[in-house]
Structures are given as C-alpha cells and as structure tokens.
Image (cartoon, rainbow, N blue to C red):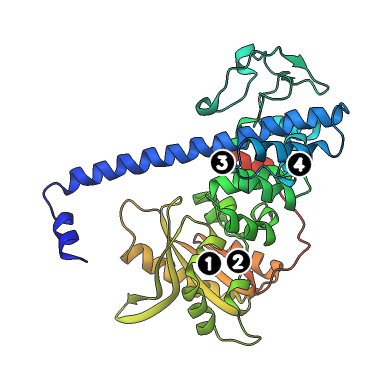
Amino acid sequence: MDKQVAHIASSEYSQDFAKVVQIIEQNRSQAIQVINHASVLTAWQVGAYVSDKIKNAAWGAKVVQQLAEYIHTQNPTLKGWSRMNIYRMVKFYDTYSSAPFIERAMSLKLLPNPADEIVPAEAAQIVSPMVRQIVSTPLIQNGYNVIVSPAVTQIPEFLLRTTWTNHIIILNACELVDQYIFYILYAEHEHLKKRELERAIKSDAYSRVLSDKKMQSAILKETYPQAEVLLKDKSILEFLGLPQRYKESKLRNEIVSHMKEFILEMGKDFLFVDQEHTLEVGGQNFRCDLLFYHRALQCLVAIELKTTTFDPRDLGQLEFYLEALDQNEKRSNENPSIGILMCKDANPEVVRYALNRSISPTMVSKYEEQLKVGSVIQRSLEEFVEFLDK
C-alpha cells in the first residue's frame, strides 16, 4: 500500500471518510437503477407504439427502417436505435403484453388480478415510482380482463427488475412463458450481468433450480426450507476444461483456479473460505476439500469432491466434518454447518436410502464436465416466486 494511502486509511477521520464513500456508492447505485428502469420503460413504450402501427397496417415493412434512419438523422449521437433493435422492442412489448404472459404473471401474483379486487385508476399504470410518467390517456378493457392504458404507459413492474440488455438475451434464448419469468427474476436475485446470464441460460439454470429431485437430507430441508432453491442438485463445470481422466486433487485445484466461475455456478451467496481445510479432532488432522460460507443461510458449507459414483460411506466422512466444524469453528451467531457431497454420478435410490438415515444437514450434488441439453422441468415456478417473496 502507498504510504500516503496508508496514512489516509489510518487517519482519525477514516470513519467519516468511509461514510462519504458509502453515500457516493449508494447514490451511484440508485442512479444506475433509475437509468436501467428508464431504458426498459423506453423500450416498452417505443415497442408499443411501433407494434400498434404495424398491427393496424398504418406502417409497411420498410417504415421501421425509415424510422431508424430518421432517429439517426435527428440525433446522430443516439445509439441502439437500429432497425433490429426497434424490432426487439416490438417483440418485448408483444411478448409481455400478450394474454398468456399476463395471465401467468397474475397467477404468480406478480401482477394484480382485477378479478380479485377493483384496481383504482391511478394504480392501473403499474410503473416503478422512480420512472412513473403522467400520461393523460383513458383506460380501456382488453381481451383478457386486464385494465390497461392504450399502448404506451402500462408495463408490468417486475419487468423493471433487470436490465434491457438482459431482456434482449432472455427474449432471444427462451420460448416458454415460465422461462421468461424465471430468468427475469433469477437475473435480479443473482445480480447477473450479460455474460453471466448467457451462461445461466446455456447451462439450463431454469431446470436445475426448479428440479424437484433434490437429493437432500430431511434435517437439511427442515433446518433450511429455502435450501431447495438456494442449493442446486447439479452443477455444470465445463469451464474447468477437465481432461478425460483426472484425480480429485485435479478437480479441486481447477475449481480453486476458476473460483469466480465456480461461485457463479453455485450461487453468488457462496463465499470461499479455504481449500483442504484442516479439522483437528483428538490430536489428528483431517482435511475437508472445500470450505465456504453461505451469506443467505448464514452457515459454513463443507464440500467434499468425488470423481466417482456416490458411495454411502462418503456421507459418513462428510457428517464427521460437519460435527467438527460445528463444535470447533461455528460461531454463536451462525447456523449449523451444511455438507455437500459433489460426485460425478449418483444412483437416486442409493442416495435416498443413505440420506434417510442422515442426522446432519447434508445433500448429494452431481456435476457434469460438459453441458447436456434436454433437461426436463420438474417443479413449479410458483415455489420459486414464493421463495423470492419471502
């Protein structure tokens, strides 16, 4: 550290300075959020306007190109207003104003249902307060029982939870209504940026997060009900570039070398603590492959790596590590430690038998070296939305 910087850091005013930095960062974050919200709202309004012109045959196929050229002529500094981007905005509006989407969003309570309550006129414009615009247009009744204002003003509020760039990725990659909704909410929950979201979609986070075949012990589900959403039962580790044959030490070292990608795969609440973490019991030293701390669950998480098929004997070793962590290292404000046995393959029936007798918060998770397409969704989106609400 530079001497001058060190002097400032140790200054008697350091706490005051830290407060100023906190104010700057907080307001900067809010400013970015306002800009992101405004970008999404602008895309919605432009998409709605152009969509209406096209559907009513007021504009032919070449008019959108002329519009793009006109915008550039009027203000050459404006970026992102090509013919392709304008059509993306049309797709954005058409997709999220469609009857199937609105009905699904209402069933998930992401939108108010007029059938349940009378929505006041001032509440019909569902827009974030930070970007609310007063537009004096009459309300109309559309074909699927939702009161909206004509075209430009109404936007489902939860669409503002992620960026316009992320919306483009989701619209291009997804086909099902539930997928659209899931990735919007997942991107917000995990604070995903462009490349991170692209990888989440490529690795089928939709199916893996909502899978109902989580191999978790009863005590884990009881102690941490939210673990079914926060902890995945399958990880895609293609970023490790593993050879055809490798040892557990190779797997561990590659994970540590690619820790940023590994945490993104596991979930951003994981904080790396140590590798080959030493646990001393009875004068003997034992080593846990990987040790993490989970911010949301507020507990230590021990991960044991196995390059073979699940063996019930490995579960006993993991439970021993958890007991050592809880007795020797867990702090009074922390919850019981969790153990994850990450193996290359697992027989679900064998895992079920083994976990039925487990007295610790443990789970078995499989990993794959390469992405395999074709996963099938098992659990409902309702549970994921309910988890986020809590």
N-terminal of the pair, mark 2 or mark 3, is 2
Q: Residue at x 55, y 24 (%)?
A: 132
Q: Which residue is mark 4?
A: 87
**Real-space Cα distance between discs 2 and 4?**
42 Å
**Real-space Cα distance between discs 3 and 4?**
32 Å
Spot occupied by residue 248 in the image (x, y as percentages of width and height): 54, 82
Question: Which of the two discs, 3 and 4, sits closer to the camera?
Answer: 4
Q: Residues within 10 Å of mark 1 (few under 14, many from 20)?
A: many
Callout 4: SS: helix
Amino acid under disc 2: Ser
Spot occupied by residue 89 in the image (x, y as percentages of width and height): 71, 39
Q: Which residue is mark 2?
A: 365
N-terminal of the pair, mark 3 or mark 4, is 4
Amino acid under disc 4: Tyr
Spot occupied by residue 126 in the image (x, y as percentages of width and height): 62, 24
Q: Are marks 2 and 3 in contact (CB under 8 Å)?
A: no
N-terminal of the pair, mark 2 or mark 4, is 4
Residue 354 seen: no
**Real-space Cα distance between discs 4 and 1?**
36 Å
**Real-space Cα distance between discs 2 and 3?**
23 Å
